[in-house]
């Protein structure tokens, strides 16, 4: 009897008890009709071979463990960054349950979104009635300041027209005439969550800006992009901007919504960009994006409105932060203060202190295009060697950008850029051309387990570790945290390798 | 926010009226049918014939648009629940990338095997539909995917095709592809029409998946099998956190032979062999009663519902099961119950004093809103409200066996309703899913995920009950719930004045 009141074993230990191990063996032998142990061993070995890798990379149709989600997730995330805004997803209801769960599992926070709950009859007759009823119920029950509508693949395949539907619903009294209902078409069979973010933010801007006359002022709009670290990052960004004395509007700020306090009250809405500020943002001098690949359409829209635009690839690391600050300084006419220059110096100091442990380390990096770009750039700054960079939602244009970046440093030589590939490809790649460190999301843990390459979790989603997103990874302060995360992994590995019984040479107190 | 605890039936009736008043009239009327307070046996059946209370709500009908329904879809029911845990098949999420991405590896259906070699549960395999696939159809691509999966995973025993919304809308013929490729590669290929828009919840997905077992797995090839009089299948246990293993152990201990587990840690062979069993033992009635009924009609295999949550139900279920197999097994069951009784006693001695009198509200999926009631009662806790995401009428009839009169019953409860119910009743614990967890905790009310056991488990069987008891204790009695109000908001008025 493995279990007792004194010591309750849960799954992680319980099933290692002999009673269970024997039961598993019995089940396997008598009832599972398994492949032979030899066949399993042979195939396990074959999976590590160059031959398998070639077959794997030749795949054209099957996608296995893609590191991307679908457009509507990006739209739901985007809506969470606006004051009092509720997402209304037009389509079948299971999708919304998935988006809410996915974001809740990462942030460990509530995530609100409603569905228009389309079923078979809507598939035949269209979802107009679902929209009319859905907006009416959402408006009355949840008392939002804005309802942000997006679609699922179902609504897109049957061709529902959001603009017409929303106007009809408005005429039928679902929401008041002047109530804000921006919308975005976000079919799941186009692009990925970063594109859904883009069109959703553009939809909000369009709602507030369309038909208005722009009266230019000196402010700067900043769009952070789809960012699982928005809680820590947006706060760090605001701190920097406040220190600089820049007048800005952060457009799409989900940092409060996904970090509400525990004090006995559940806040369905918290923080977010004020709707009045979104409207006023038309008058800004410029709109800049922290993530180019998340905001291409939005930036075009801002440019069409007469603003200057600029985009960055996630300001993580020294040079990336330098570039951002200089651009902000240029646009705002505000100098970069000494306190920030000092922060930069401290980051450089930290890199110098640790360079011996980072120099020449080989990395595989996966995630969204902007993150991968930024992470590779920072790795180059530390003397590390990006060896494989992979974005399932990376385009050929992204791959070209990556290649330019890698060519700019001797440490980028020989790095392979994998646009559109998935994590099962990466598995083969890591077996045949191993690296020292893997950087990505929690999905990398399966690769870590199989290949033994340590995983540093630095991007969305992080399901299996807590609170990472509460700390910034952008700016000089954020880079310190990234640096520390990498170093902790390096040192943990070094210690683990040096602590095997009888082989504890190099198990040093001081590193 | 009110901290009044409202327990009586009348106040619960009023609570329902309050909640409904927030809806537009048309939808208040529709939602009213889903909310009720359970009656005492005599009220429910004045003729005295029924000994059970009734939970009279409408169920298994469409959710109203524009609310936060907690329900999933048919795809979630088929891929996420029934088929996904079958370990030696590769499951294709056929359609756009999202569904497989969100449903992947989140239900903790444990299995033994080498992932990517002879087991595939935690893989996300998708056809990743692009616009051109919507325009030209996905059948050709599906054929190619199946060929590629043969190259990638030659030791798999077969493939399931889990349709996502667009596949049904554009009229793809996945059945034809399955038949064609089955002939070519000589492996089982199962097309499942579980598009998310079908039906009103994940429930139809369970049914559709069951039907595909009937149509595409059973009687397809000769089964070599030497039976014994003690052969049973575990049906409707998805091995969340290892639940089915904790259950299997008990069944083996009383002398039964479990020839198939469905579908947690299952292999195709175990599914094919199932009709050879003497008895099907069904845990999640909602998701797998269909195939049990089929096996009864077609193969003469009887089925029996059981409940392995908490010592009272475990003992009752072991006795009920043993009765089917005669005195020897019955004697074994008594021995096993007696063997575990000291552990149960020790667990209750430790945890009951910490949990006695605590009230619980539940909102889960298929069986747990009723099945776990007695596990809580064993710990001295009381269920004050319960409901299902996707139950049918027969589930609510069964619920009457478990709940007391005056229990609040809510079907397909919306986020709005559940929050208001929780806020007003202020139970000591809420048991529901990930989407409900954080709002409830922000209110200062302890919470346990009753879909996934919060990354804990198992909860089934005696081994599981130890964890269940510990988990309820750690949820309710953690010091954090006392930290919500800062001291300066509690009593020090001088400080407050100064601050203002």
Image (cartoon, rainbow, N blue to C red):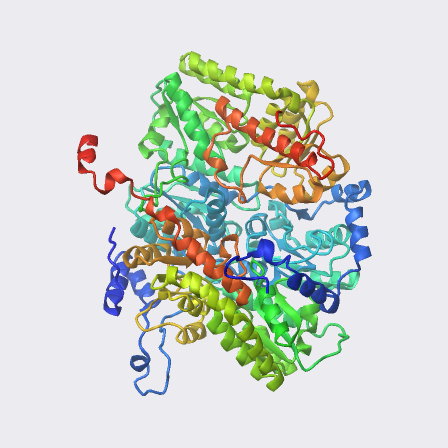
Quadrant housing the C terminus of chain A: top right
Compared with A278, A64 (above or below) is below
Across and down, in percent, residue A173 comes to 29, 51
**Nearer to me, B282 or A330:** B282
Compared with B44, B79 (above or below) is above
Is residue B195 visible to us here?
no
Q: Residue at x 62, y 54 (%)?
A: B94
Q: Is residue A471 left or right of residue B485?
A: right
Q: Quadrant of residue A10?
A: bottom right
Compared with A81, B129 (above or below) is below
Across and down, in percent, residue A306 comes to 42, 22
**Nearer to me, A15 or A254:** A15
Q: Quadrant of residue A249?
A: top left
Is residue A64 visible to us here?
yes
**Nearer to me, B251 or B11:** B251
Q: Residue at x 70, y 60 (%)?
A: B88
Across and down, in percent, residue A23 comes to 67, 65
Quadrant housing the N terminus of chain A: bottom right
Across and down, in percent, residue B92 comes to 65, 55
Q: Residue at x 40, y 25 (%)?
A: A238
**Nearer to me, B115 or A131:** B115
Count of residue discs: 0
Q: Quadrant of residue A359?
A: top right
Q: Residue at x 65, y 37 (%)?
A: A454
């Amino acid at each position: 009897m493995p279990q007792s009141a004194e010591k309750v074993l849960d799954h992680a230990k319980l099933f290692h008890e002999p009673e269970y191990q024997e039961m598993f063996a019995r089940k396997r032998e008598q009832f599972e009709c398994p492949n032979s142990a030899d066949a399993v061993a042979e195939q396990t070995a074959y999976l590590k071979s160059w031959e398998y890798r070639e077959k794997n990379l030749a795949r054209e149709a099957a996608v296995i463990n893609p590191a991307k989600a679908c457009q509507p997730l990006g739209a739901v995330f985007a809506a969470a960054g606006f004051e009092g805004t509720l997402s209304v997803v037009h389509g079948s209801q299971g999708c919304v349950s998935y988006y809410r769960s996915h974001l809740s599992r990462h942030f460990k926070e509530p995530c609100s979104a409603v569905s228009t709950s389309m079923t078979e009859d809507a598939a035949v007759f269209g979802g107009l009635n679902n929209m009319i009823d859905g907006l009416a119920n959402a408006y009355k029950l949840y008392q939002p300041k804005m309802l942000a509508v997006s679609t699922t693949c179902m609504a897109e395949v049957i061709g529902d027209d959001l603009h017409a539907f929303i106007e009809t619903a408005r005429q039928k009294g679902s929401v008041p005439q002047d109530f804000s209902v921006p919308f975005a078409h976000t079919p799941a069979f186009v692009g990925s969550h970063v594109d859904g973010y883009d069109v959703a933010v553009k939809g909000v801007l369009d709602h507030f800006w369309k038909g208005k006359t722009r009266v230019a002022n000196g402010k700067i709009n900043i769009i952070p992009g789809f960012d699982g670290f928005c809680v820590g990052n947006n706060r760090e960004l605001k701190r920097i901007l406040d220190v600089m004395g820049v007048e800005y509007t952060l457009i799409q700020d989900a940092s409060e919504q996904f970090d509400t306090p525990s004090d006995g009250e559940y806040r369905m809405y918290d923080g977010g960009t004020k709707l009045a500020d979104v409207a006023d943002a038309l008058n800004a001098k410029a709109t800049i994006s922290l993530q180019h690949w998340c905001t291409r359409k939005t930036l075009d829209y801002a440019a069409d409105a007469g603003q200057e635009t600029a985009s960055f690839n996630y300001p993580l690391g020294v040079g990336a932060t330098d570039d951002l600050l200089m651009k902000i300084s240029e646009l705002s006419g505000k100098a970069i203060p000494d306190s920030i220059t000092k922060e930069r110096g401290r980051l450089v100091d930290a890199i110098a202190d640790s360079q011996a442990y980072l120099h020449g380390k080989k990395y595989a990096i996966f995630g969204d295009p902007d993150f991968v770009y930024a992470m590779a750039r920072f790795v180059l700054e530390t003397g590390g060697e990006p060896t494989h960079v992979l974005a399932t939602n990376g385009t050929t244009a992204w791959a070209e950008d990556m290649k330019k970046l890698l060519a700019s440093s001797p440490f980028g030589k020989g790095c392979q850029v994998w646009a559109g590939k998935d994590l099962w490809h990466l598995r083969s790649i890591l077996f045949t051309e191993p690296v020292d460190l893997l950087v990505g999301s929690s999905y990398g843990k399966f690769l870590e387990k199989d290949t033994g390459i340590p995983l540093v979790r630095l991007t969305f989603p992080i399901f299996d570790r807590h609170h990472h997103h509460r700390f910034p990874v952008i700016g000089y302060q954020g880079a310190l945290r990234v640096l520390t995360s990498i170093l902790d992994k390096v040192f943990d590995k070094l210690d683990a390798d040096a602590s095997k019984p009888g082989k504890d040479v190099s198990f040093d107190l001081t590193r | 926010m009110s901290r009044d605890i409202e327990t009586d039936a009348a106040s619960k009736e009023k609570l329902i009226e309050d909640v409904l008043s927030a809806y537009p009239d048309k939808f208040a009327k529709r939602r009213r049918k889903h909310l009720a307070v359970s009656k005492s046996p005599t009220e429910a059946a004045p003729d005295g014939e029924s000994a059970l209370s009734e939970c009279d709500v409408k169920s298994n009908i469409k959710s109203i648009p524009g609310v936060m329904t907690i329900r999933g879809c048919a795809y979630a029911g088929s891929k996420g629940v029934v088929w996904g845990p079958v370990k030696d098949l590769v499951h294709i999420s056929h359609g756009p990338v999202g569904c497989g991405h969100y449903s992947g590896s989140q239900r903790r259906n444990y299995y033994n095997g080498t992932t990517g070699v002879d087991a595939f549960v935690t893989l996300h395999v998708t056809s990743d539909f692009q616009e051109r696939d919507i325009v030209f159809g996905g059948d050709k691509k599906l054929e190619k995917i199946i060929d590629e999966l043969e190259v990638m995973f030659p030791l798999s025993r077969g493939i399931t095709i889990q349709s996502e919304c667009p596949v049904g809308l554009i009229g793809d013929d996945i059945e034809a592809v399955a038949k064609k490729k089955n002939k070519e590669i000589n492996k089982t290929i199962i097309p499942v029409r579980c598009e998310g828009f079908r039906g009103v919840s994940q429930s139809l997905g369970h049914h559709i998946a069951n039907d595909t077992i009937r149509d595409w797995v059973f009687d397809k090839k000769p089964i070599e099998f030497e039976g014994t009089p003690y052969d049973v299948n575990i049906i409707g246990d998805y091995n969340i956190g290892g639940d089915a293993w904790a259950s299997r152990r008990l069944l083996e201990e009383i002398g039964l032979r479990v020839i198939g587990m469905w579908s947690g840690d299952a292999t195709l062979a175990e599914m094919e062999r199932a009709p050879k069993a003497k008895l099907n033992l069904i845990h999640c009635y909602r998701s797998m009663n269909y195939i049990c009924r089929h096996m009864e009609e077609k193969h003469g295999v009887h089925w029996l519902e059981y409940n392995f949550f908490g010592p009272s139900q475990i003992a009752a279920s072991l006795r009920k099961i043993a009765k089917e197999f005669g005195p020897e097994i019955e004697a074994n069951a008594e021995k096993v119950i007696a063997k575990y009784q000291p552990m149960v006693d020790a667990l209750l001695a430790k945890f009951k004093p910490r949990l006695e009198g605590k009230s619980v509200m539940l909102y889960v999926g298929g069986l747990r809103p009723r099945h776990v009631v007695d596990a809580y009662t064993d710990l001295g806790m009381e269920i004050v409200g319960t409901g299902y995401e996707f139950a049918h009428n027969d589930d609510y009839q069964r619920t009457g066996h478990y709940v007391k009169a005056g229990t609040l019953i809510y079907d397909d409860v919306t986020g709005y309703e559940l929050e208001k119910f929780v806020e007003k009743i202020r139970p000591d614990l809420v048991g529901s899913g990930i989407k409900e967890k954080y709002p409830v905790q922000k209110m200062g009310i302890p919470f346990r995920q009753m879909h996934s056991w919060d990354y804990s488990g198992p909860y089934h069987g005696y081994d599981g009950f130890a964890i269940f008891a510990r988990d309820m204790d750690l949820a309710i009695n953690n010091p954090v719930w006392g930290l919500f109000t800062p001291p300066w908001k509690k009593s020090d008025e001088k400080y407050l004045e100064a601050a203002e």
